[in-house]
Image: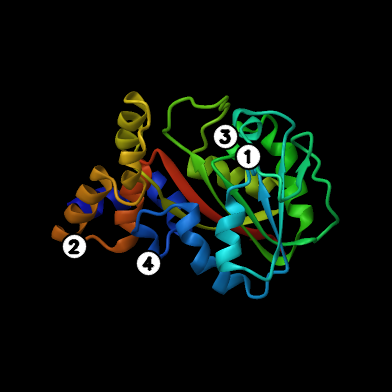
Amino acid sequence: MLRKFIERQNAYQVLKPYITERGRRQTTAESWIGEVIEQVGVANNILDLGCGDGRSIELFNRVLPAAAWYGVDIESSPEVDSRTREDIQFDTFDGIDLPYEDGFFDLIYTNQVLEHVRHPDKLMPDVRRTLRKGGLLIGEVSYLEPYHSYSIFNFTPYGLSRVFSDAGLELLEIRPGIDAYSLIARQLVGGPRLLNFLFKLSPMNLMIGLLGTVVMLPPPMIAFLKLQYSGQFCFLATPRS
């Protein structure tokens, strides 16, 4: 009965093309990187779009030690203002026009950034411009997450697919992140580090996974249910041919 109910949902039909067998697992952009590196092949230049304090350089030094890391952000934000590193160069831009050549990057990473972008419809075409053919854009974005750090928009998976399509990007895959209820509860108590384990596996996602197994739902349907209640979700995209 649950399977038939989901099949009738317009939202399921819209999101189904972007859900893979592995997509039912709760994911963060950071944890997805290793798998994505296998798809992108050789990566010489990578960009952290909205790099904040620059912490992602440590991640990419581990998974892509030979690649050149670039970090770009607007002039001021709570994350930018918290920078203490002096061993790497940060680039600044106006939130729309990226200061890089066409097709310069093999991989662009943007983690919890797009909900803070004032003009995403103007920025994303420039993201498309700076990605090489076959390059990948990977990131994470807010869906049902409450306001935080000057956030402006919350994207639905469908909404993000429209913004990408208009910019000449093809959405390849989406995966659920932490469930909204856990994210809200964590924020309510001040976001203590001891609750960071919720980003790896949160209670509602665990419950949905168990329910799906009991009633023998296929993985795309389990992923769909998790996405419907996600506080954040992850995405993978590439320039459209």
In the image, taking residue 65 as reference, residue 91 lies left or right, namely right
SS for callout 4:
helix
Circle 1: residue type: Gly
Please give the name of the residue rendered at 56% of the width and 27% of the height, measured from the top-left corner.
151
Q: Residue at x 55, y 50 (%)?
A: 139
- Look at the numbered discs 2 and 3 and tell me whether their residues touch, using CB distance below 8 Å: no
The numbered mark at residue 52 is 1
Looking at the rendered image, the disc whose residue lies closer to the viewer, 2 or 3, is 3
Disc 4: which residue? 21
Q: Quadrant of residue 97?
A: top right
Residue shown at the point (38%, 46%) measured from the top left: 227
Which residue corresponds to mark 2? 216
Which secondary structure lies at badge 1? loop
Numbered disc in front, either 4 or 1: 1
Determine the CA span between mark 2 and mark 4: 14 Å
Q: Report how far apart the C-alphas of labels 1 and 3 lie in the structure.
A: 14 Å
Q: Is residue 114 above or below residue 235?
A: above
Left/right placement of residue 91 relative to residue 166 reads right
Residue 90, how many percent across, how many down? 74, 45
The Cα–Cα distance between marks 2 and 3, rounded to whole angstroms, is 35 Å
Pick whichever of labels 1 and 3 is earlier in the sequence.
1
Q: Callout 1 environment at 10 Å: few (<14), some (14 to 19), or many (20+)?
A: many
Could you tell whether 113 is left or right of 185 in the image?
Answer: right
Image location (x, y in percent) of residue 85: 66, 44
| Camera-side mark, 2 or 4 | 4
**Tag in front: 3 or 4:** 3
Residues at discs 2 and 4 in contact (Cβ within 8 Å)? no
Which is nearer the N-term, disc 2 or disc 1?
1
The tag earlier along the polypeptide, 3 or 4, is 4
